[in-house]
Image (cartoon, helix red, strand yellow):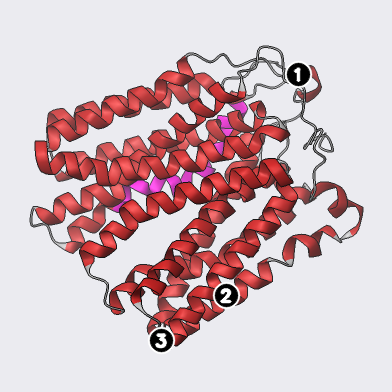
């Protein structure tokens, strides 16, 4: 595989991947605090389920970040200027998170201030994510994107484990103040690698013309993005339909809560990291296009195994093995999908384009999660997992079917290794 020539002054791939891993670890650390640690702490203190559910309001900025993404991208890549501003946006957001975690340590576990502060932290990390995605796309050559996506997805899994399980362990032993302070120190540590990197100026060939402004309309008008959005929907339905029902299904099959906690905590982290590394290796060895097909095949096989288990009711170890296989395949799919979708973004507004793809994936996750619960409740787990398997098998045909749609599909859905975005003006 040929690789792109590195931009003079650009960070090395190792240092870049370390910095990206730190950025995405912090983002997921805040998510883990809001969705795993805080509900558990509140419930343990006697709060009602309705009150503990309020903690999820802290994630609202992630659902709405597309509203301000165009303005962030315009500031990150100024019109007709070679300057890039990804680094100050990311460092500014990470600094806000550090300050908020320090404030949480000082204030203690008070419901209203905690939810409000975590909401501000989520706003900061959601904004950072727009700039971080653009930064990664700008700096990663096509031959490096597999490892860059490993850093992104692996950092996300590590952050969830730190903000969820690690925080709860520290809280149980040392209390809220020490646990929150430890998260602040971890965030500072994860931010440090980016301080050492310099962001090189943009090549003159990728400068925005004076008439261009980063907008959603610009993204929608490009066929590559429209087909990419269709693929995000089609490739995500199967996994998302089944993922939300894994926990309830295992509980109904006799798995106890402590076992399930271990499965989601230790097992989920290990499975995620294995799948992440597998996805990175596939991208590096096969290229983004073939790696995508391989990952979709793994997902289809895992979903088929899950559907078979739901119908045949085998022994518990087989059920857990099938669940773990889906978690591995899902992580592998994330890496290969992100590596490939990066090639569909425009160098004029990569952060905005990738945000649109991510928002679409989040919408699919929410809709499929609700649909999966409805199906499992009304028709049973077998029907739910069977439909998920069908979606997974159909997803295998989508990339090749769209690729056959004329000259656009041949060039845009399989970006050449030498320059994945050269076809965009």
From the top left corner, tell me how far across and down residue 63 is, in percent: 45, 50
Magenta span main SS: helix
| Earlier residue among tags 1 and 3 | 1
On screen, residue 326 above or below 54 = below
Quick check: 318 left or right of 174?
Answer: right
| Position of the C terminus by quadrant | top right
Q: Residue at x 27, y 25 (%)?
A: 185
Q: Say if mark 1 contacts mark 3, CB within 8 Å.
A: no
Residue 173 occupies which quadrant of the picture?
A: top left
Foreground pick, 147 / 67 = 147
Which mark is in front, 2 or 1?
A: 2
Q: Quadrant of residue 73?
A: top right
Q: Is disc 2 surrounded by few (<14), some (14 to 19) or many (20+) residues within 10 Å? A: many
Q: Which residue is mark 1?
A: 203
Label located before the other in sequence (2 or 3): 3
Q: Vertically, is 81 above or below 181?
A: above
Residue 189 horizontal/vertical position (percent): 35, 23
- What residue does disc 3 label? 378
Q: Secondary structure at mark 3?
A: helix
Image: magenta residue range: 56-75
How crowded pointer 3 is (Cα within 10 Å; few <14, some 14-19, many 20+) is rated as few
Judged from the image, the secondary structure of the residue bearing numbered disc 2 is helix
* Location of residue 405 in the rendering, given as x and y in whole percent from the top left corner: 86, 61
Which mark sits nearer the N-terminus, 2 or 1? 1
Above or below residue 39? Residue 318 is below
Which residue has dot 2 on it?
389
Between marks 2 and 3 in the image, the one whose residue lies nearer the viewer: 2
């Amino acid at each position: 595989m040929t690789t792109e020539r590195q931009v003079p002054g650009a960070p090395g791939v190792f240092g870049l991947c370390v910095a990206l891993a730190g950025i995405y670890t912090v983002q997921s650390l805040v998510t883990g605090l809001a969705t795993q640690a805080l509900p558990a702490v509140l419930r343990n203190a006697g709060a009602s389920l309705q009150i503990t559910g309020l903690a999820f309001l802290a994630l609202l900025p992630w659902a709405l970040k597309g509203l301000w993404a165009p303005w962030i991208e315009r500031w990150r890549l100024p019109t007709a200027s070679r300057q890039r501003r990804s680094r100050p946006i990311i460092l500014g957001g990470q600094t806000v998170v550090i300050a908020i975690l320090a404030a949480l340590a000082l204030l203690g576990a008070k419901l209203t201030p905690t939810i409000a502060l975590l909401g501000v932290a989520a706003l900061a990390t959601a904004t950072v994510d727009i700039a971080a995605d653009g930064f990664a796309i700008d700096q990663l050559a096509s031959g490096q994107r597999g490892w860059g996506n490993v850093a992104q997805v692996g950092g996300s899994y590590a952050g969830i484990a730190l903000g969820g399980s690690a925080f709860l362990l520290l809280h149980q032993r040392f209390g809220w103040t020490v646990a929150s302070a430890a998260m602040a120190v971890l965030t500072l540590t994860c931010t440090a690698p980016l301080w050492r990197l310099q962001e090189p100026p943009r090549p003159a060939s990728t400068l925005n013309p004076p008439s261009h402004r980063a907008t959603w309309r610009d993204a929608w008008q490009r066929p590559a993005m429209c087909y990419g959005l269709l693929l995000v929907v089609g490739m995500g339905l199967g996994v998302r339909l089944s993922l939300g029902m894994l926990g309830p299904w295992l509980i109904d099959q006799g798995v106890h809560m402590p076992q399930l906690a271990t499965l989601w905590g230790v097992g989920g982290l290990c499975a995620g990291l294995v799948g992440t590394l597998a996805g990175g290796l596939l991208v590096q060895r096969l290229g983004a296009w073939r790696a995508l097909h391989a990952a979709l095949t793994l997902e289809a096989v895992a979903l088929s195994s899950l559907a078979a288990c739901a119908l045949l009711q085998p022994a518990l170890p087989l059920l857990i093995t099938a669940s773990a296989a889906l978690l591995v395949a899902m992580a592998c799919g994330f890496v290969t999908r992100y590596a490939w979708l990066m090639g569909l973004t425009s160098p004029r507004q990569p952060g905005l384009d990738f945000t649109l793809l991510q928002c679409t994936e989040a919408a699919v996750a929410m809709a499929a999660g609700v649909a999966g619960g409805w199906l499992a409740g009304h028709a049973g787990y077998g029907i739910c997992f069977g439909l998920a398997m069908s979606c997974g098998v159909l997803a295998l045909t989508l990339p090749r079917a769209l690729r056959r749609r004329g000259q656009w599909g041949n060039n845009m859905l399989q970006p050449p290794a030498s320059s994945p975005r050269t076809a965009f003006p």
